[in-house]
């Protein structure tokens, strides 16, 4: 998780959250769910789209749509956002943790084979960090499993000329920090399941504090990271965490500001200069390789979407040295997901063990100044 409470110089917002974009989202013309549906149908193919207040809520309603039962087994990669596991447990289902492929950190087909039982009903297949998982092969080898194409981090990625997120029995996309659709909250999903759940609207107070915390602590971080504004930022952030814990519920209705933000992000995504991003990624990939630090994660198949820099350092020692260099340069970084109690048997997850203490996530530089600062930190090791 990005540490918002340390003083940093490089912010992690995309340019659409500045100036005219932020103004357009707040004061611009009204946008409806139908506008987003039309946009998705033109980009991803026509299907029935449903909305939810978060990616975890989309997953919740997808599982409900297939009539999930207490005790149903859900195969899921052990290295993943913890909110996914919470959904499974909230539905009284049983998560079965699968190992990952150390080459792209996606779920391992070999591990799925080893963990599948007569009680296995679902497999959640995330395309982590925008790199397409091997979902088509999973569909071929496991026709009896209900496959959920988790594209929360893969909006815009493709595999065999098909959009990631559309290839399973259900799929979803999400808006959020650290995602291609970089924003506050909101999600959209589709499902071939037949059961439907009555609409439930999310809490207005959560929406208010979500946007307040995001804008204050992320969009305006360069202005609010210093005392006394930083104290206000911490208060807002912790208030949001408490309110979210008390009032959060899985909702299949989203607020009008979420609709407008989601539409704005999807439109901006199509206009984004992906060629320039690819050039930056290529330059940094070559620099990491020549420096002996490690490798930049890249797709094993299909066409990925680059929205952050994920580095697999050559060793835990190298990662620690790199962290120190990033701290000296005041650059944001993360060491990936914290595994908690699901990582109790190292022998069960050899793929994960081989990379766990080597993963480092960095925001993509958005201008030449940030790029040079990052390159300087790399060369300093």
Image: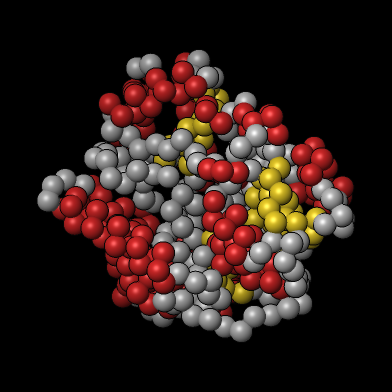
Q: Foreground: 9 or 245?
A: 245
Whether residue 375 appears in this view of the structure is: no
Q: Residue 260: give x, y in percent of width and height.
A: 43, 72
Q: Foreground: 329 or 76?
A: 76
**Is residue 123 toward the left or the right of residue 179 in the image?**
right
Q: Farthest residue in the left direction?
A: 228
Q: Residue 145: give x, y in percent of width and height.
A: 82, 57
Residue drawn at 35 percent across, 38 percent down = 332
Residue drawn at 18 percent across, 52 percent down = 231
Residue drawn at 79 percent across, 59 percent down = 121
**Is residue 179 toward the left or the right of residue 373 in the image?**
right
Q: Foreground: 56 or 94?
A: 94
Q: Residue 250: give x, y in percent of width and height.
A: 53, 71
Quadrant location of residue 101?
Answer: top right
| Count of labels in the image | 0
Q: Foreground: 14 or 101?
A: 101
**Is residue 121 toward the left or the right of residue 341 in the image?**
right
Where's the N terminus, which quadrant? top left
Residue 201 vertical placement versus 171 (above, below):
below
Quadrant location of residue 28?
Answer: bottom left
Q: Residue 157: give x, y in percent of width and height.
A: 63, 50
**Is residue 285 toward the left or the right of residue 12 in the image?**
right
Residue drawn at 30 percent across, 57 percent down = 237
């Amino acid at each position: 998780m990005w540490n918002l409470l340390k003083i940093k110089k490089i912010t992690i917002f995309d340019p659409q959250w500045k100036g005219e974009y932020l103004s357009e989202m707040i004061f611009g013309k009204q946008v409806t769910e139908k506008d987003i549906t039309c946009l998705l149908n033109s980009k991803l193919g026509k299907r029935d789209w449903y909305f939810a207040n978060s990616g975890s809520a989309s997953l919740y309603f997808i599982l409900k749509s297939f009539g999930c039962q207490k005790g149903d087994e859900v195969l899921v990669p052990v290295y993943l956002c913890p909110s996914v596991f919470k959904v499974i447990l909230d539905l009284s289902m049983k998560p079965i943790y699968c190992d990952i492929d150390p080459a792209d950190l996606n779920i391992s087909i070999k591990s799925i084979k080893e963990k599948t039982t007569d009680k296995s009903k679902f497999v959640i297949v995330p395309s982590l960090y925008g790199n397409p998982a091997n979902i088509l092969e999973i569909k071929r080898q496991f026709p009896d499993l209900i496959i959920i194409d988790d594209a929360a981090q893969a909006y815009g990625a493709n595999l065999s000329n098909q959009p990631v997120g559309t290839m399973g029995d259900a799929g979803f996309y999400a808006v959020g920090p650290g995602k291609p659709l970089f924003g506050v909250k909101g999600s959209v999903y589709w499902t071939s399941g037949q059961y439907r759940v009555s609409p439930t609207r999310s809490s207005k107070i959560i929406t208010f504090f979500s946007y307040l915390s995001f804008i204050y602590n992320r969009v305006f971080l360069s202005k609010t990271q210093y005392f006394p504004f930083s104290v206000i930022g911490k208060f807002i952030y912790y208030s949001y965490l408490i309110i979210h814990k008390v009032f959060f519920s899985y909702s299949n209705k989203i607020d009008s500001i979420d609709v407008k933000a989601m539409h704005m992000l999807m439109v901006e995504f199509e206009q984004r200069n992906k060629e320039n991003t690819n050039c930056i990624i290529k330059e940094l990939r070559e620099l990491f390789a020549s420096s002996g630090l490690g490798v930049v994660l890249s797709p094993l198949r299909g066409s990925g979407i680059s929205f952050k820099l994920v580095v697999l350092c050559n060793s835990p020692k190298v990662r620690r040295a790199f962290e120190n260099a990033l701290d000296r340069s005041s650059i944001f970084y993360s060491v990936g997901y914290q595994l908690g109690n699901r990582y109790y048997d190292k022998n069960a997850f050899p793929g994960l063990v081989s990379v766990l203490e080597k993963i480092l996530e960095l925001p993509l530089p958005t201008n030449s100044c940030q790029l040079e600062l990052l390159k300087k930190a790399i060369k300093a090791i």
